[in-house]
Each structure stands twice: as structure tokens, then as C-alpha cells.
Amino acid sequence: MANTVLVSLVSMGTMGALFGAGLAWASRKFAVESDGRIDEVEECLPGANCGGCGYPGCRGFAEAIVTAGAPCDGCPVSSSAAASRIAEIMGVTIEESDERLVALVHCGGGHEEAKNRADYIGIDDCRAAAIVGSGAKGCEYGCLGLASCVKACPFDAIAMGPNGLPVVDGAKCTACGRCVVACPRALISLVPSSKQVHVLCRSFGRGREVRDNCTVGCIGCKACERVCEDDAIHVTDFLAEIDYTKCTNCGACAAKCPTKAIIIEGAQVKVADTVAATLEASS
């Protein structure tokens, strides 16, 4: 009996050693060489794994930079110094830009401004509400107010305001785009932080329909379009939209808008008192 056990142990030990040696040889023989730059690039990334770059985590983005030519400054969370270091590793140059993007919620119809057509009782999620009867709000394009964007933000840059609308903290926003994806009504976009004149409406309804449901909705009157000297705002399908590449923050469109669907925010935007006075006199 003892001999049988001993023989079994020796046999199993010998087989284990042989298999181990075989696996070690195979791992060396068929090993896929990894580009060391991937590790270097990954070390430059913040490790947030937010997906804002469009790739599955920081490792995925690092691999895309090295193997697929993804932009070295494609991480919305990284600093310009980190992007420069990545470009140095890759042996390329990137154009320096001081412009950063921040999330903007294109809806001003909160509890005070927008009417509800029903009470929503269901899952506390905007996507769920959009599926079940399009939510409670009378405007079928407006913010549902159930904070899906807030829950999606990994940087605590959005919070629900007292009026039932999401409020973005520009200082914390990294433009990762998670909130953009989370909104079922496509109400959030990433805009240049230097631009402070915005259309807070995404309704494609006609003027009367908009007025029936919201006091601050865009009615497509084109008053803004007529007063813009920079050709930066146009009305298409009853909705005004700003071309931020042309907008100079003059604020003329906001001063003229009869429903105040266009707003000016930020201390750096200064609209001359004569602008409003001139527009009022010409109307």
C-alpha cells in the first residue's frame, strides 16, 4: 500500500513538472510582444476610467494611442501637461489650446416655467420615464428632472437644482461626456467654456405648442437671427441654435429673445447697456 502511494506521488509530481515546463516553454515560444509605450502612456493618464475618450478605460485608450493613432490629447480629464508628455512618448506634437469644454443643459423649463400633464410614478430614472408615456412634462422635448445625468457623472460636477433642473459646476466638469450619453432627450452638449450665450431649449414644437407648455421655450420667431451681426445664430425647424465658432458673446440675441430662451451667463460677458436700449427702440 505504501509503495502504491509513493509511486502515485512520484508519478504525479513528475507529470506536474513536465506540464509546467511545457507551459513555460509555450509561454516564451508563443508570447506576443507588448509595446512598452502602452505602459508609459497609461501612467500619464488619470486612471479615472470614465470612458470620456470613447475607449474602454485608460488602458484601452493607451493601447489606442500606441496602436491605432488615437489623439494624444483625447482624454478630457487629463491636463495639457499630461497630453504633452504622451505626445513626447509617441514622438509627435500637438497643438496647444487653452479652450476647454464644459457640459451645458439645453433646457430652462423647470418647475416654475414648465407645465406638467401628469404625475409620473415609476423608476427614478429619465430613460425609464421617457419610455413610459414620455414622462410627466407637457413639453415632450424638455428635461425630465430625474437626475440620470447626475448619477452618470463620475466627477460630482452636476447636481439637481431647486427648480428641478440639473446644474453643472463648470469648475468640476471634465467634459467626459457621460451626462451627454445618459440624457434620453439629448439635452446636454459640450460647449466651449469661453462661450456664455446659450439657447436653453431643445423643442422643435411650433410657437403655440411651446407657449402652451413652457414660458421660456424657443418659439422659432427668428428675432435672434435678425439681430445677430456675426451670423452666429439660426432658426431651423422652429429652434434657434448657436454656432459657437462664430459667436462673440455680444448678447444681442439674448436681449431680443421675447421668451428669454436665450441666456447670458458668466461675469466675463459684458453686454453694453446701449444694446438692449437700441433693440427696444427698434422693436
Image: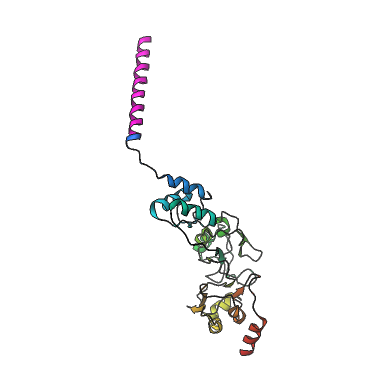
Looking at the picture, the colour scheme in use is: rainbow
Q: Residue furthest bottom?
A: 282
Say whether residue 59 is visible: yes
Q: Position of residue 220 (x, y in %)?
A: 53, 80
Q: In this view, does 270 lie to the left or right of 183?
A: right
Q: Residue at x 57, y 63 (%)?
A: 120
Report the quarter where the C terminus lies: bottom right
Q: Which residue is drawn at 50% across and 52% down?
A: 85
Q: Position of residue 132 (x, y in %)?
A: 51, 62
Question: Residue 115 versus residue 157: which sits nearer the camera?
Answer: 157
Q: Splitting the image into 4 quarters, where does residue 196 fall? A: bottom right
How many dots with numbers?
0
Residue 202 in picture, x, y percent from top left: 53, 72
Q: In this view, does 31 lie to the left or right of 193?
A: left
Magenta range is 1-27
User: Does 14 lie within the magenta span?
Assistant: yes
Q: Is residue 266 above or below residue 228?
A: above
Q: Where is residue 197 in the image (x, y as percent from the top left)?
A: 58, 73
Q: Mainly helix, strand or loop, the magenta region?
A: helix
Quadrant of the rendered structure where residue 106 is?
bottom right
Q: In this view, does 68 lie to the left or right of 189?
A: left
Q: In this view, does 75 lie above or below 2?
A: below
| Residue 1 shows in this picture | no
